[in-house]
Image: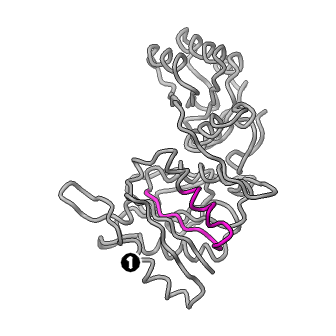
Amino acid sequence: MRILAINTGGTIGMVRTDRGFAPEKGVVAQALNALAPASDGRLTVEALDFDPLIDSADAMPEDWNRIARAIAAGHDLYDGFLVVHGTDSMAYSAAALCFALEGLAKPIVLTGSMLPLPEDGSDGIRNLSDALAALTSAPPGVWLQFAGELLHGARLRKIHSTAFEAFTASPGDAPPLRPGAVFRRHEYRSRDIAVLTTAPGMSPALLRQAAKHCDAILLRCYGSGTVPNTAALREALLLARKRGIPVLAVSQCAEGGVAFGTYAAGNLLIEAGVINGGDMTAEAAYAKLMLALSGDDPAGLLRSILAGERRSAEA
C-alpha cells in the first residue's frame, strides 16, 4: 500500500528554540521512516513537505488548496494520504478538504500532536502510528486520527488546548465524503468573511462594517438560533440581504445546532433571509462559506449537504 504523507508543519514536527516551539524539517520524516518498517512491508510511505513548514495558526485557504492539489495530483498513484497538520486549525483544514475533493476514492487521514515528537511523553508517535494503521482500513473520506479515535473530518471541534484528547466530532448521518461520479477538485478563493458572535451589547459599528464591506457573514447565534433584537443587528442583516451577501447561522453551543422558529427571538433571522446552518460546526461553516463564495451559486451550495457536515437538510 502506497501512502503519500503531506507534512504541512504543526506542533508534532517542532523543536525548542529561544522563542518557543517552531517547525523544523526532518523531524516528522525521521519518525515516519522509523514507523514504516514496523508495518511488515505492508506500507510504503513517501513524504512531501510544505516549504516552508507552517504553524497551523498561519494556515490560509491557499494552504487548503496546496494540500488538495497534492492529493489530486496523487489520487491515482497512491492508496491513501496522510496529512500531518497543526491542531489549532486542524478542524478548518479537515472540513475544507471534505468539501474540495468531490468523488474522492481514497482515505485521507489527518493527524498531529499536542507535544512535539522530540519532547518526552509526546503523543506524536502514537498518533502517527495510529494514522498509518487507519489508512489500511478507513473507507474513502477525510478523517482525523487522534488520541486513539478516528473522527469525522467535517464535524470536528478542538475542545481542549493542552490535553492529548483534544478533539471530538459529533455523530453524523453521512461519511466525510463529497459524493461524485468522477474525482474533481474544487479551488478555494480567499474572500472577506466576517465571523460575528452574538453577545449582549455587541458592537453596532462592527455589524455595520461587516454588512457594508464583507462578502459573507458567519453568525454564531445563541442556543437554537436566537439573536439580540436590536436595531443595529436588524439593520445589518437587512443590509446584507439587500447586497445579496450570504449570512450563515450556526449555534455557539457545541451540540444541538440552530432550529429557526423555535423562539420568537430568532424571527429576525428568517425575516432577513439568513441561511440555517443546522448543527454544523463553526469551522465547517467557515470553510463551506469560503468554497461557496468561490462558485456561482453560494446560497444553493450553503443549503445543500456536501460531506455529512450537518445531520439533515434545512427545515
Q: Residue at x 61, y 36 (%)?
A: 289
User: In this orientation, which residue lies closer to the viewer: 39 or 62?
Assistant: 62
Q: Quadrant of residue 21?
A: bottom left
Per the image, is 69 magenta?
A: yes
Return the residue found at the far top.
231
Q: Say how many tags the image has.
A: 1
Residue 185 coordinates in the image, percent (x, y): 67, 52
Residue at the spot of label 1: 30
* Region in magenta: 67-86
User: Vertically, is 315 above or below 71?
Assistant: above
Q: Residue at x 59, y 68 (%)?
A: 81
Characterize the local packing of mark 1: few (<14), some (14-19) or many (20 or more) Cα atoms within 10 angstroms.
few
Dot 1 lies on which element? helix
Return the residue found at the far front.
73
Q: Quadrant of the N terminus?
A: bottom right
User: In this orientation, which residue lies closer to the viewer: 25 or 89?
Assistant: 25
Residue 240 coordinates in the image, percent (x, y): 61, 18
Return the residue found at the far bottom.
40
Residue 97 coordinates in the image, percent (x, y): 61, 53
Q: Name the kind of residue labelled 1 in the image.
A: Gln
User: In this orientation, which residue lies closer to the viewer: 221 or 292?
Assistant: 292
Q: Is residue 303 left or right of residue 161?
A: right
Q: Is residue 158 left or right of residue 181?
A: left
Q: Quadrant of residue 43?
A: bottom right
Q: Quadrant of the C terminus?
A: top right
Q: Residue at x 42, y 52 (%)?
A: 56
Q: Quadrant of residue 277?
A: top right
Q: Residue at x 72, y 57 (%)?
A: 175
Q: Is residue 153 left or right of residue 54?
A: right
User: Vertically, is 203 above or below 17?
Assistant: above
